[in-house]
Image: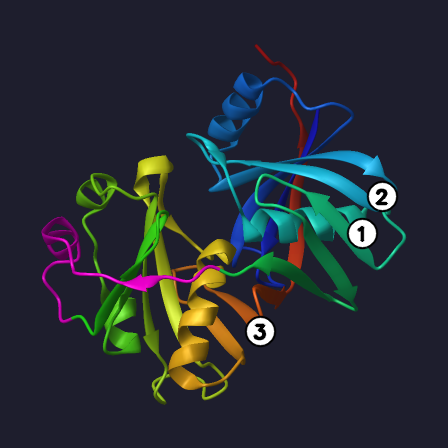
Amino acid sequence: MHIWQVNAFTNEPFKGNPAGVCIVDEFPSDDLCQKIAAEVNYSETSFLKKITPSHYHIRWFSPKDECGLCGHATLAAAHLLWEKNHVEEDMITFESMGGPLTAQRNGEWITLNFPSFIVEPAPMPELLNKALGFIPVTSVYKDEVMYIVVLPSVEAVRELKPNFAKIAQLPCRSVTVTALNEGEIDSNIDFVSRYFAPKVGIPEDPVCGSAHCRLTPLWAEKLNKYSMNALQISERTGFIRVTLENTRVTLTAQAITVMEGNLLAAA
């Protein structure tokens, strides 16, 4: 089985979010997909099966489970399908656990069309407060998948040193922290974030597309602005142009292939 590493939400090697991409004639067993994802140990590895020339079934595996929706591994997959000339059309459609998705090519940029998710205001759980070190917090939101914590500044997001063991004990998949950019960094950036999912083997995800399916409607409402520029300020960093379109979010970004290889043995 051939496997590639594609860095998503960047056009530079060693930045953005690395994803494994495997193009298969038939999906391996769930157990083998999970073992490959754990062996590769990226935050997600995508498996792609062609249905028609520009329509694929996509599945995503973290090191510990199958994921319901993943932005960066979809961006990586679309980039690779075009780069390796598997698809001639400028639009790719995907069947996925997260519903129907699309990727549109425009030069070096790719626009993903994903569902948007509304997070609701929530009290700060004591365990999450401990996990974040009792730092000042502006507001807290949640849905069934993640907590989103709004911090008072870009610096607060950047300097945060979370307790991953405590985050893993929370009754959710992940935690995102975010802040408005009020002139602290490039004025082109509207908001920043970081994402933590130690429960599924991802202490810090360098750039998370599915988090931006929640951050986009949240910041759109706060700013009364429906097209924004987002920067995830992990150590690797990643840039996304986000737009809220009714019940959908578009994520526009770049990707770069940095490695390829072959799986020589499978149990």
SS type, badge 1: helix
Residue under label 1? 82
**Amino acid type of the residue tagged 3 in the rendering:** Thr
Residue under label 3? 243
Residue 199 quadrant: top left
Near mark 2 (Cα within 10 A), the count class, few <14, some 14-19 or many ≥20, is some
Mark earlier in primary sequence (1, 3): 1
Q: Position of residue 196 (x, y in %)?
A: 33, 51
Q: Position of residue 265 (x, y in %)?
A: 62, 14
Near mark 1 (Cα within 10 A), the count class, few <14, some 14-19 or many ≥20, is some
Looking at the rendered image, the quarter that the N terminus falls into is: top right
| Of residues 16 and 62, the one drawn nearer to the viewer in this rendering | 62
Start-end of magenta stretch: 117-136
Q: Residue at x 68, y 64 (%)?
A: 111
Is 145 displayed left or right of 128 in the figure? Answer: right
Assess whether residue 120 is covered by the magenta stretch: yes
Mark earlier in primary sequence (3, 2): 2
Asked if labels 2 and 3 touch by Cβ distance under 8 angstroms, the answer is no
Residue 137 quadrant: bottom left
Q: Nearer the viewer, mark 3 or mark 2?
A: 3
**Amino acid type of the residue tagged 2 in the rendering:** His
Spatial CA distance of label 1 from label 2 is 6 Å
Q: Residue at x 84, y 59 (%)?
A: 90
